[in-house]
Amino acid sequence: MIEIQNLTYSYDRADDKVGGLALNGINLTVNDGEFVAVLGRNGSGKSTLAKHINAILLPMGGYVYVDGMDTLDESKTWDIRQSAAMVFQNPDNQIVATIVEEDVAFAAENLGVPPDEIRRRVDYALGAVGMTKFRKEAPHLLSGGQKQRIAIAGVIAMKPKTIVFDEPTAMLDPSGRKEVMKTITELNRKYGITIIMITHNMDEAVCADRVVVVDKGRIIIDDKPRNVFSDVDKMRRIGLDVPQATQIAFELKKAGLDIKCDILDEQECVEEIIKLCR
Amino acid sequence: MLKDITLGQYFPIESPVHSMDPRIKIIITLVFIIAIFFIKSLWGFVAVALYVIFAVKLSRVSFKLVLKGIRPILFLIIFTALINLFMTNGEIVNIGGVPLKAGFLKITKEGFYSATVMSLRLVFLVMGTSILTLTTSPILLTDGVEKLLSPFSKIGLPAHELAMMMTIALRFIPTLLEETDKIMKAQMARGADFESGNIINRAKALIPILVPLFISSFRRADELAVAMECRCYRGGKGRTRLNELKIGTRDWIACLSMLTFMAVIVLINMYL
Ligand SMILES: Nc1ncnc2c1ncn2[C@@H]1O[C@H](COP(=O)(O)OP(=O)(O)OP(=O)(O)O)[C@@H](O)[C@H]1O
Ligand SMILES: [Mg+2]
């Protein structure tokens, strides 16, 4: 479980004015097994928030608890990083070794896990992301989506309870996006891993159980995707998009048609439009 | 494509030599290199040649591949041979009563001999190291170097850090090459010219490639450092490995073969 209480942070230590705060009083609790999407404009503080969850950044005000461990407690730093892992945007800059399975083993090696247990974890992690076939390949020969799955396997080998993703699909093509999103949802549904995923892609945010919107270092919305996206005007005011299907329904309604607005995916949209035609 | 470059010259097949412990291979190669510098007689080189042929056969790598390593230093070998051939003092060779001597250049018996010995030494030196790099993956090579240097970490030699740097360098060379290619194409699309002009102009043309490359490397390094910290990296202390190095029967047999080889060399040096 992740508990964030009244968290503030500023990159600019010298000036503690409210204007210079990257995070300004964040309160957020993420329960075990949840899938939370974090949205927000560029520079709203999403990445800063994510880096607090595994003690890469430490709170200047307030507290962050990961499974009850305070991130300010230095003796717990490594336990926290093991419990709440993180995957970044660019897979190229996260892969350390020249062979896939060596890279997946990296985290477990750092934790001092015995070799036969590392072997078991590597097999498990590669299986979980569906990359067992590629275990002996060189990472630089893989596609972007495959590389990102390797990066995910690399943190799964730590057996984390939570994985924080910072725009995991931003550098991928549509097919890479799809395979990474499938992997992430599967980790949540099948393996029970808590997911916190930062994204700019609204269709990906729809996969989550809960959507959190960050703006100017504060959380301004925290609700189910359906409730969040049905208020298209509000999202626009914040400067965010809504999923394409929601957008279509919204425009149709504005044009005077009797259609409901809380639509999230293509399927629902098609059904609603067919209903209209009857 | 730049992407397909192979690093080092590792030739991935299965053989008794490939599956040896890299530490033993490195040590044997070092001993071998030192040994060939002690050999004086041509009989010694016969022994060396037999040993190398034996190792190559065992490694199932083709001779052509092993000999390929000689090409880049062929010039050096020829140059050394010529210097030795023409500049060594001693008994001047006569052909049909004509002494082979012109100014300060002369061909002597001793010169002929030392030219042969020097070239053979260089050739076998390259072949020996080629067998090592052809049969050992870069990862195992760095692992081996790390383990061999680790006793020196007590006196402050950063063995683990060196090995880590080597691994990361190997990992990022293809990525950076690809990036260089991308930047060059981007600059060429804006009219940059890398091919014409004198050497100074060409060097100048490289600046717009190197600057973005450097900046992006620093950004990559920064991101990689954070990603490594996120995966609990905290130096070599307390670290375990997926594939621990193990010395087995095969390695002891190899050591034995090396000792036999050394004994033969010593005997040849003493009696022939
Ligand atoms: N290393 C840093 N040093 C100084 N300021 C920073 C640093 N990183 C981020 N900031 C600032 O902190 C604020 C929040 O940045 P953050 O990276 O958390 O935004 P973000 O929501 O992740 O944006 P994006 O969608 O572009 O990734 C921004 O104003 C940014 O300029
Ligand atoms: Mg960000």
Image: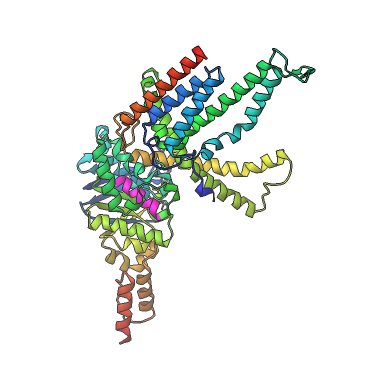
- On the picture, is B219 further left or further right than A196? right
**Residue lying farthest front?**
B96
The residue drawn where x is 63% and y is 41% is B207
Residue A3: image location, x then y, percent: 23, 47
Which image quadrant for residue B250?
Answer: top left
**Residue B211 lies in magenta, yes or no?**
no
The prevailing secondary structure element of the residues shown in magenta is: helix
Residue B26: image location, x then y, percent: 42, 27
The residue drawn where x is 56% and y is 50% is B182
A68 and B90: which one is in front? B90
The residue drawn where x is 30% and y is 78% is A271
- On the picture, is A44 further left or further right than A223? right
- On the picture, is B120 further left or further right than A265? right
- On the picture, is A262 further left or further right than B126? left
Image height of B149 relative to B229, above or below: above
- Magenta span covers which residues? A145-155
Which image quadrant for residue A73?
Answer: top left
Applied colour scheme: rainbow
